[in-house]
Image: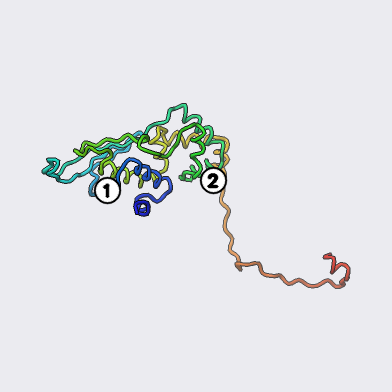
Amino acid sequence: LWKINMSKYAKTWWGQRFIAALEDFTDSGRLQRGRSYSTDNRIKQWLLKEGKVEAKLRGNINPYFGVYKEPTYKISVQMTHLSAAQWQKIIQKLTQRASFIARLLLNEIPENIENVFADLGVHLLPNDYRDFKVACDCPDYEVPCKHIAGVCYRLAGQLDQDPFLLFEMRGLAPEKLLQELASSPLGKVLSDAKSGATVELAPVASFYTRPVMIEPPQEISLKGFWQGQ
């Protein structure tokens, strides 16, 4: 049931993969409660800068924890960064494949992009809790709490719209990646083809090829007829 409902909060395969990583270290009850904390009604402040999300969420009154008036909690979510040397090697491999460059320039993440990262012993998308660094100042001792889960849901939705945020979460500025892709030899060819003059569409009289009647020749040779001359 959780995997089916997950598509409501992330529509792309990379957004769903991001949320699915939470399953490794979050119980289903917190995940369900966390969904309600991803709405505009709950999120009072949202800042995503240099691959780190800092948000303020409206909490609930809970006498069990000694909370008798509506609180505001501070949450931070980030992912472990790859080193500059690792990114240099990854970019070098990405710019050698036209399919990777084309998909990325179209604001999409190729399904087989993890093969490039796997060659270096790393990965782009999160696999488990070790890929996350999260914090919340709520009284819940469990990590991640429902507030952190809510921020992750909201972040997954943003990743759907801007997949380059995933690279930023891993420590690579989107501007840097786009610059490297566009300046590569293959990237220049694709950019030139994309920016070239478009071919004007010409209307047609029919959706299928119509036969054209031609006059038969004055003289017909049986040999030429049967041999296709």
* Discs 1/2, front: 1
Q: Quadrant of the C terminus?
A: bottom right
Few, some or many residues within 10 Å of mark 1 (<14, 14–19, 20+): few
Few, some or many residues within 10 Å of mark 2 (<14, 14–19, 20+): few
Q: Quadrant of the N terminus?
A: bottom left
Q: Is residue 73 left or right of residue 50?
A: left
**Residue nearest the observer in this picture, 145 or 152:** 145
x, y (%) of residue 142?
Answer: 25, 38
Residue 29 disc label: 1
Along the polypeptide, which appears first: circle 1 or circle 2? 1
> In the rendered structure, are the residues bearing label 1 and label 2 in contact, judged by CB atoms less than 8 Å apart?
no
**Residue nearest the observer in this picture, 62 or 53:** 62
Residue occupying the point 28% across, 41% down: 148
Structural distance between the alpha carbons of marks 1 and 2: 48 Å
User: What is the secondary structure assignment of the residue under circle 1?
Assistant: helix
x, y (%) of residue 202?
Answer: 59, 60
User: What is the secondary structure assignment of the residue under circle 2?
Assistant: helix
Which of the 4 quarters of the picture holds residue 163? top left
Q: Which kind of residue does numbered mark 2 sit on?
A: Lys
x, y (%) of residue 85?
Answer: 47, 26
Residue 131 drawn above or below residue 9: above
Residue 219 drawn above or below residue 37: below
Residue on which disc 2 sits: 194
Q: Which kind of residue does numbered mark 1 sit on?
A: Gly
Residue 224 drawn above or below residue 130: below
